Image (cartoon, rainbow, N blue to C red):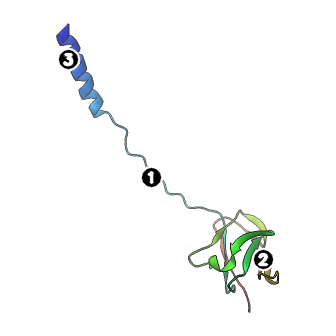
Amino acid sequence: MNYLCAGLILLSTVLLQGCHYPDAAKVEQKDSRPAIGVSGAPKGAMLYVDGLEMGAANQFDGKGNVLLIESGKHLIEVKTVDGKTLLAETLFLSSSTTKVLTVQP
């Protein structure tokens, strides 16, 4: 009986060491939301999407940094600190589209 228990324990240990989960698969998914960028925005100008402040316009330069938004129709504005509108454009953006708007001096 002791040999049987010892054998079962040994067999269980050997079998359990051989069991392991396979490595998790790495799945990389690109974000398919549209993106906007702003070039030529002066320092201190703010970016607004549909009336909501998104941050400093010059941080979304369209080269390395863009702002991801949902697909659809949006009012994009760039305003100075004192509220002067430098750019106002209504756009319809669909998935995987990147639009870079230029602020004219």
- Depth check, mark 1 against mark 3: the one in front is 3
Q: Which residue is mark 1?
A: 26
Considering only order in the chain, which callout, 3 or 2, is on the residue closer to the N terminus? 3
Residue at x 32%, y 33% (from the top left corner): 19
**Dots 1 and 3: beta carbons under 8 Å?**
no
Q: Disc 1 and disc 2: Cα gap in Å?
A: 39 Å
Residue at x 20%, y 16% (from the top left corner): 6
**Residue at the extreme front:** 82
Instruction: Give the secondary structure at mark 2.
Output: strand
Amino acid type, mark 3: Gly
- Position of 20 with respect to 72 (left or right) is left
Image quadrant assignment for residue 70: bottom right
- Position of 91 with respect to 95 (left or right) is right
Image quadrant assignment for residue 11: top left
Instruction: Examine the rendered structure and indicate whether residue 75 appears above or below residue 6.
Output: below
Q: Which residue is mark 2?
A: 77
Considering only order in the chain, which callout, 3 or 1, is on the residue closer to the N terminus? 3
Label number found at residue 3: none
Image quadrant assignment for residue 81: bottom right
Q: How many marks?
A: 3
Q: Residues within 10 Å of mark 2 (few under 14, many from 20)?
A: many
Q: Which residue is mark 3?
A: 7
Instruction: Give the secondary structure at mark 3.
Output: helix
Percent coordinates x, y for residue 15 in the rendering: 27, 27
Percent coordinates x, y for residue 1 in the rendering: 20, 7
Q: Disc 1 and disc 3: Cα gap in Å?
A: 40 Å
Q: Disc 2 and disc 3: Cα gap in Å?
A: 76 Å
